[in-house]
Image (cartoon, rainbow, N blue to C red):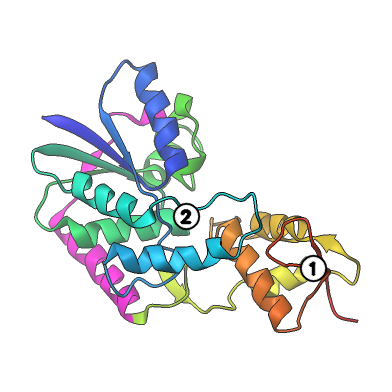
């Protein structure tokens, strides 16, 4: 039976392919191309997610990457991930909002298909002798040590995760963040105070403010990506809570607190 490793992000998939090469295995790797910790999740229709992402990429400055076919990629991911006759191993970390959201959404789609998981937050301290928040930050040399630590998902575990994801879908909040209780819904302004705390009365490049906020939001959990923080900077400028010296979608522009 063909083994397929299912990863929560493109970067994690790249490292796992390298890890498989290191141990001379030809397993298939399938990477998820979405971040379900933000945006609408009330429907499983890929076009809904694609349309939501496109609004942000439409606002980006010239030269930034644009999604080529988000809807097609999502449809292809779910087609391949749920194909019959596969041994599925899903990798994720519970201390990453992106990865935990992906995992809960996966269990909601799983149905009766058998599945094994490698939870790096669970396996990391045992195998790597250190805590691991997310699979996306583990290099290939360490990932290869986790081969063989996969375990089957129990029916009770699947049912509980499915209920959690369905609750989050019902709430359909702008953000989902990790807490000690697991993944919970958060409002659109959840990260605004964090961004404002890194702004001053002096002009700073937007990339600097976002970078500092991104670092702060990564302890003790990885909560949000730079694009969503960038979008919140734009919102804060539009609300007059930050001042900008130009197009606030442009990394090179500067922002400061109002006098």
Instruction: Decide if residue 84 is on the left or right side of residue 66.
Output: left
Residue 101 higher or lower than 124, as above or below: below
Question: How many numbered circles are shown?
Answer: 2
Q: CA distance from mark 1 to mark 2?
A: 33 Å
The quadrant of the image that shows the C terminus is bottom right
The quarter holding residue 167 reads bottom left
Of all residues shown, which one is farthest toward the front?
A: 62
Circle 1 crowding by C-alpha within 10 Å: few under 14, some 14–19, many from 20: few
Circle 2 crowding by C-alpha within 10 Å: few under 14, some 14–19, many from 20: many
Task: Look at the numbered disc 2 and give the secondary structure of its residue.
Answer: loop
Residue 149 higher or lower than 226, as above or below: above
Residue denoted by label 2: 96
Residue 140 drawn in magenta: no
Tell me which residue sits at (71%, 60%) in the image.
Answer: 250
The x, y position of residue 257, in whole percent, is 84, 75
Residue 146 drawn in magenta: yes
The quadrant of the image that shows the N terminus is top left
The x, y position of residue 156, in whole percent, is 16, 61
- Mark seen at residue 246: 1
- Sequence order check: which comes first, mark 1 or mark 2? 2
Tell me which residue sits at (46%, 63%) in the image.
Answer: 53
The x, y position of residue 8, in whole percent, is 38, 48
Instruction: Decide if residue 34 is on the left or right side of residue 258.
Output: left
The quarter holding residue 111 reads bottom left
Q: Which span of residues is magenta-colored?
A: 143-170
The x, y position of residue 187, in whole percent, is 52, 79
Of all residues shown, which one is farthest toward the bottom?
A: 239
Pair 1/2: label in front: 1
């Amino acid at each position: 039976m063909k083994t397929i490793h299912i990863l929560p992000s493109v970067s994690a998939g790249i490292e796992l392919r390298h890890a498989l090469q290191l141990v001379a295995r030809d397993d298939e790797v399938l990477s998820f191309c979405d971040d379900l910790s933000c945006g609408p999740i009330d429907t499983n229709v890929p076009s809904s997610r694609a349309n939501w992402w496109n609004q942000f990429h439409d606002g980006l400055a010239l030269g930034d990457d644009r999604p080529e076919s988000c809807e097609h990629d999502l449809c292809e991911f779910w087609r391949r991930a749920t194909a019959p006759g596969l041994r599925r191993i899903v990798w994720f970390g519970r201390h990453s909002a992106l990865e935990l959201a992906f995992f809960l959404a996966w269990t909601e789609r799983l149905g009766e298909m058998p599945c094994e998981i490698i939870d790096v937050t669970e396996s990391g301290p045992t195998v790597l002798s250190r805590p691991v928040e997310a699979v996306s930050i583990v290099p290939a040399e360490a990932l290869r040590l986790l081969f063989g630590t996969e375990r089957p998902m129990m029916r009770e575990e699947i049912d509980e995760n499915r209920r959690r994801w369905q609750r989050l879908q019902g709430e359909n909040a702008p953000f989902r963040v990790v807490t000690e209780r697991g993944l919970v819904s958060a409002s659109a302004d959840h990260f605004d105070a964090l961004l404002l705390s890194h702004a001053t009365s002096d002009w700073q490049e937007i990339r600097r403010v976002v970078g500092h906020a991104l670092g702060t939001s990564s302890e003790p959990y990885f909560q949000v990506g730079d694009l969503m923080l960038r979008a919140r900077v734009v919102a804060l400028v539009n609300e007059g809570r930050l001042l900008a010296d130009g197009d606030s979608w442009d990394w090179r522009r500067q922002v400061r607190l109002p006098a």
